[in-house]
Image (spheres, rainbow, N blue to C red):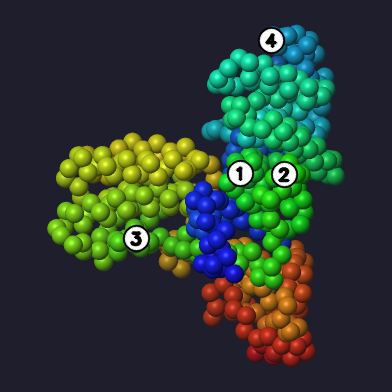
Amino acid sequence: MSPGSTRFKIEWGHANVRKIIIHRYSTGVRGAVLEQGTVVEWLIDQEIEGDIPPGVIIQGKVIDILPGMDAAFIDIGAEKNGFLLKKELVDYQQKKNENNNQPVSVSKPINSLLTKGQRVIVQVKKEETGTKGAKLTEIVSFPGKYIVYMPHGGYVAVSKKMNEDLNRDTFRALGQAWIQGSEGIIFRTLAEDANPEDVRKEFEWLREQYHSFIAKGNESPSKVMYLYNESSIFSRVGRDYLHDDETIIVVDNREDYLLLKKQLPVDKSWKLEFHQEKQGIFSYFDLQTALDRSLKPFLWLRSGGSLFINYTEAMTVIDVNTAKFTGKNDQKETAFKTNKEAAAVIAEQLRLRDIGGIVLIDFIDMKSDKEQEEILQVIKRTLRNDRTTTNVLGFTKLGLLEMTRKKTRKPLHEALQIPCQTCDGSGWIKTSEELTRELEDELFARRFAIEDAYLVEVEDRMMALLTAENKKRLTLLKQVSGKELFMVPSEKVSGYEIRLAGDREEIQQQWEMRQHS
């Protein structure tokens, strides 16, 4: 059933209703935030490449110890080793807490606390800069919506922004009752207006997450690996949306459903839905069409105007045009109406496409300062829905609107696409990983079809991915579809094409003929 159906419209009858769609495929997770049936944000779990962002928790290995600096170098799987000071060790922190949180001089040298080759669980405090590696800490923390959980924090703190001292004392007492051993907790301002049961539930969930990551590391104690990323889909959904009564979360994987259900009080179980339709969840909500649209640089406005979004290495430049919109009166009125519509749409697209860094917007010429100010107010008002920090700086002397949006992840077009080599990098094409995910969705939709097998033509880079690691991805596709799959490399297709469907012997015969042609 598509989002345009009657049932879908009834579900979206309340103005503030939001749905989070989470799709688990064979090698990852994908999701979307829908408001009034429209995608406003894509949730894409991205592999960490290059600099490791703050907040990531890693199982690392001690490479070298520098007693003179009271520090150690840690292999964290990056090009540069991380830097861990003695004061960032759990042992040091516990001594500090025993001394009423005052600075202490721990007599033990760092080489008596750490040994080369030792496994350490560390969190990135500050990403690497220049020749310096990332700054690390053993005092890891897990941020939630209402609290920050610290397995080795050793204290309870309450946000100073809470309104009354009485509330702060109440939360301090709650925290002391909840924590065990060396645990610590910080209550955020939002906890003040929350149901205490929801806050407790989040505390228990974050504690459980920590122990699950430790268990994951214990399975491969000698391996350097990422254990936790606070910008992952489930971390973001749990923190930002799970306890919001205007949000419903729909998942298509039973383990994910049970994982999220643990975080919810019994009386809020209605917030979570398990998708069990024959139609895949992305198809059911028509998300693939919306995703493809979000990758296109050209965008029509409802009025007939248009936007062109140009991604460069240094910034994103957005051009506004009247295009097919001629207006009813003069050219000045037409330009202003197009600019107003474009301002709101651009703010929405920045969030939808996860565009970060410097953004320059070339609106249609406006002669009046009043008109420019109104455009500024439109874009600022629409940006209030964006959880990522933005800063609208204003119009330059050349009439360009200058703004910034904090970079937290790769923008959508970089996460799912690579530069096109045929057009010398001036265009973008989908990654082989993204194309394989789309093929998986299509095969999943055919899992109840009567055909036993499929003949699929794929371009060379997809074939390389499918057959790598002893055909691991191809095996996963077969498991998802429940069909026998025969792959043929082809220069005639862009991505993939399912050419034939039938019984296994018939398709295998066709495949063998093509192998020898």
| Residue at (33, 44) in percent of width and height | 378
Q: Amino acid at mark 3?
A: Leu
x, y percent for residue 230: 64, 40
Q: Which residue is mark 3?
A: 301
Q: Which residue is mark 4?
A: 103
N-term-proximal mark, 4 vs 3: 4
Distance (Cα) linking label 2 and label 1: 11 Å
Who is closer to the viewer here, 110 or 240?
A: 240
x, y percent for residue 89: 74, 23
Can you tell which mark lies on residue 245?
1
Among the 4 quarters of the image, the one containing residue 93: top right
Can you tell which mark lies on residue 267?
2
Up-down relation of residue 336 to residue 56 (above or below): below
**Closer mark to the observer between disc 3 and disc 1:** 1
Up-down relation of residue 100 to residue 38 (above or below): above
Q: Residues within 10 Å of mark 2 (few under 14, many from 20)?
A: few
| Residue at (38, 56) in percent of width and height | 309
Distance (Cα) linking label 1 and label 4: 43 Å
**Closer mark to the observer between disc 2 and disc 4:** 2
Distance (Cα) linking label 3 and label 2: 43 Å
Q: Amino acid at mark 2?
A: Asp
Distance (Cα) linking label 2 and label 4: 46 Å
Up-down relation of residue 176 to residue 403 (above or below): above
N-term-proximal mark, 3 vs 1: 1
Q: Is residue 232 visible?
A: no
